[in-house]
Image (cartoon, rainbow, N blue to C red):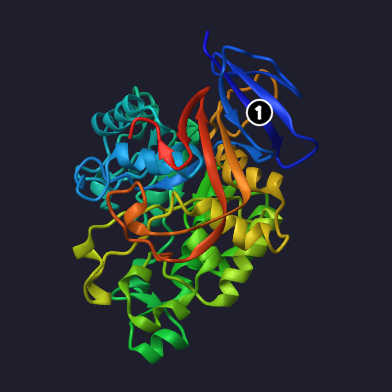
């Protein structure tokens, strides 16, 4: 039985350094000075050991846009970012609205073997918002779909959304909503505020997001179902989440790293690298999101990793596709925005990047404590290292990162999936 020895590490950055012995994909021993002469060794050098990260919101583009990303390259980016599980959104071509497509995504992820790739099923056929997809068939298929979303599109018809929540309740699956009232965002490309007005960019109001969050909280309450809000971006959404949770509604929300760090002042250059859906908001919104993540009002961090071809970004701002790369930079941005100011400690990082996302979708073997008998899905982080982002050096096929030439703290030095080293010293296994 294969063994892996991770030497001289501090789980959650707490206590004295220990060694962690992994045998057969499970943590077998945690102690100082473990002797395992036949084990593969990772020298931790006093670094921080965390449970492997879980991303509820990833775009891997396969099938259909393999020119921008594949399950293989996206998995490599995820492993390098410290992830052991990602959820691949349904807006592929063909759309993942049937078990044929979701099973392909699951099988391909298992073949690559760098992270567990869980397919997200579409809520409606073709993401058109008119007819519910075969959620039951996808949930009971090989891929065992446990989350459904029309991400990229809002399920804006309240009756369709109500029916989806009712079905989800009976199937014990999660509906993840892209909260955007489309009648308020027609032609919109940037946050509705002074910056967009000065630059002549069509404005995207906060109310477009917040009205759907409020509506879906009420629908979830009446259906007795769970609803998850994708990429929360406004201070108003934070207040609505506080209210809904106070009412006992089963609602959760994620925030992206870019909405924690960036704001609409980035639009001054008209560079479409900063175009994203929902748009970058004002600095006050980013501050409210950081506070809400620290408090647990916003449950977790999700990347919304969205690779795009160069021709889809290097064009007029209004015509550009929205989205940014996110898998390899997520941990560093959380370290800069949340750990350095003291909003989260490293156990808190484990909570928002691993434990809570795994709990939200009911994963049994990810987001688990670092303890004997637990699955060895682990991430090793050097908190004192720095690195500078260069899009061309990232694992993704695309290089649409807004963080080009920015220097960030904290480097993922190794990732382990069930005892297998999937990334080490900046290289993904087998890539």
> Residue 87 or 78: which is nearer the viewer?
78
Residue furthest out toward the bottom: 198
Which residue is situated farthest in the right direction here?
15
Percent position of residue 388, x then y: 47, 60
Mark 1, other Cα within 10 Å: few <14 / some 14–19 / many ≥20: many
Above or below, comparing residue 133 to residue 2 in the picture: below
Q: Is residue 407 left or right of residue 120?
A: right
In percent of the image, x 80 and y 35: which residue is there? 16
Residue 242 pos. (x, y %): 66, 60
Q: Which residue is under mark 1?
A: 7
| Residue 419 x %, y % | 53, 22
Q: Secondary structure at mark 1?
A: strand
Q: Is residue 407 above or below residue 329?
A: below
- Is residue 243 visible in the rendered structure shown here? no
Q: Is residue 423 visible?
A: yes
Relative horizontal placement of residue 9, taking residue 333 as reference (left or right): right
Name the residue: 51% across, 49% down: 228
- Residue 219 left/right relative to 63: right
Left or right: where 52 falls relative to 339: left
Quarter of the picture holding the C terminus: top left
Query: Which is more toward the observer, 95 or 22?
Result: 22
Specify the quadrant of the image occupied by residue 22. Answer: top right
């Amino acid at each position: 039985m294969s063994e892996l020895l991770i030497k001289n590490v501090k789980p959650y950055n707490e206590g004295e350094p220990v060694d962690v012995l992994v045998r057969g994909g499970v943590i077998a021993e945690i102690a100082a000075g473990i002797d395992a002469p036949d084990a593969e060794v990772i020298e931790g050098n006093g670094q921080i050991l965390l449970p492997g990260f879980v991303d509820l919101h990833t775009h891997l583009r396969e099938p259909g846009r393999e020119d921008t990303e594949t399950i293989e390259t996206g998995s490599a980016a995820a492993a390098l970012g410290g992830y052991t599980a990602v959820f691949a959104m349904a807006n592929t071509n063909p759309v993942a609205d049937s078990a044929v497509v979701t099973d392909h995504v699951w099988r391909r992820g298992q073949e690559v073997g760098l992270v567990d790739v869980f397919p997200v099923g579409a809520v409606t056929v073709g993401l058109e918002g008119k007819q519910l997809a075969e959620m039951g068939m996808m949930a009971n298929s090989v891929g065992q779909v446990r989350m459904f979303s029309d991400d990229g599109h809002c399920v804006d018809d309240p009756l369709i959304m109500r029916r989806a929540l009712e079905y989800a309740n009976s199937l014990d699956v999660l509906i993840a909503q892209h909260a955007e009232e489309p009648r308020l965002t027609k032609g919109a490309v940037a946050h509705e505020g002074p910056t967009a007005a000065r630059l002549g960019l069509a404005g995207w109001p906060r109310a477009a997001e917040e009205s759907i969050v409020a509506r879906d909280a009420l629908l979830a309450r009446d259906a007795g179902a769970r609803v998850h809000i994708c990429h929360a971006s406004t201070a108003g959404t934070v207040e609505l989440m506080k209210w809904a949770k106070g009412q006992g509604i089963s609602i959760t929300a994620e925030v992206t790293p870019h909405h924690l760090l960036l704001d609409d002042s980035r639009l001054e250059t008209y560079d479409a690298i900063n175009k994203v859906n929902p748009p970058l908001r004002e600095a006050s919104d980013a501050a409210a999101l950081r506070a809400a993540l620290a408090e647990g009002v916003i449950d977790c961090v999700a990347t919304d990793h969205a690779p795009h071809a160069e021709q889809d970004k290097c064009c007029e701002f209004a015509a550009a596709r929205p989205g940014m790369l996110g898998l390899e930079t997520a941990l560093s941005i959380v370290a800069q925005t949340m750990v350095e100011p003291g909003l989260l400690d490293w156990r808190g990082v484990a909570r928002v990047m691993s434990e809570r996302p795994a709990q939200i979708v009911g994963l049994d073997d990810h987001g688990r404590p670092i303890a004997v008998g637990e699955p060895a899905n682990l991430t090793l982080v050097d908190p004192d290292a720095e690195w500078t982002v260069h899009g061309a050096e990232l694992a993704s096929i695309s290089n649409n990162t807004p963080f080009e030439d920015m220097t960030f703290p904290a480097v993922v030095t190794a990732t382990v999936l069930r005892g297998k080293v999937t990334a080490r010293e900046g290289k993904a296994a087998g890539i």
